[in-house]
Image: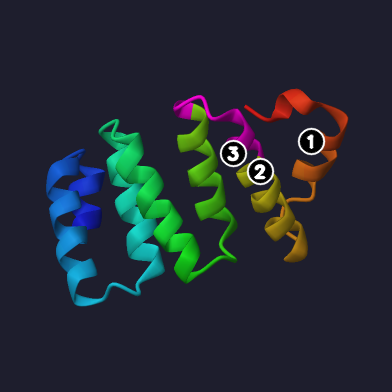
Amino acid sequence: MARVFADDKKHDLAIECLEKALKIDPYYAAGWNNLGIEYSEIGNNENAIKCYKKSIQLNPDKAITWNNLRIEYYAVEDYERAEMCYKKAVELDLERGVNTKKKREYNDDKSYFI
């Protein structure tokens, strides 16, 4: 149901659904990531960061969550943490053989980190 609300840009309702789901299963890493996305959509960077960190705590091998956390750190101008998250996301992608173009671009052009 949260997905339907999110797709309709009803982020407050999506947040409500995800929070209820996470009360039932607080170990659902993807739920924490999705909740972070919803908080990000309404500009609540602080809660988005908390959610992404919780998701990473539960499943540290998801590159997409590290990238989402990077975006939030960048939004709050914490560039050092943003870069660390970016590097972790690329490392995880490369370990899985995904998108090797990212590493090449990063090594060739540091401005890729945006």
Disc 3/disc 2 C-alpha distance (Å): 5 Å
Q: Place residue 55 in its image quadrant.
A: bottom left
For numbered disc 1, what is the local secondary structure?
Answer: helix
Q: Does the magenta stretch include residue 23?
A: no
Q: For label 1, count other residues whose C-alpha is less than 10 Å away and answer few (under 14), some (14-19) or many (20+).
A: some
The amino acid type, in three-letter code, at marker 1 is Tyr
Which of 10/31 is in front? 31
Callout 2–callout 1 Cβ contact below 8 Å: no
Q: Residue 81 carries which label?
A: 3
Dot 2 falls on a residue whose secondary structure is helix
Picture quarter containing residue 26?
bottom left
- As drawn, is 3 to the left or to the right of 111? left
In the displayed structure, 89 sits above or below 11; it is below
Q: Along the horizontal axis of the image, is 61 left or right of 69? A: right
Q: Find residue 65 and report its horizontal and vertical position in percent.
A: 50, 54
The residue that mark 1 highlights is 106
Which residue lies at the image location 18% right of the left edge and 70% below the top edge? 23
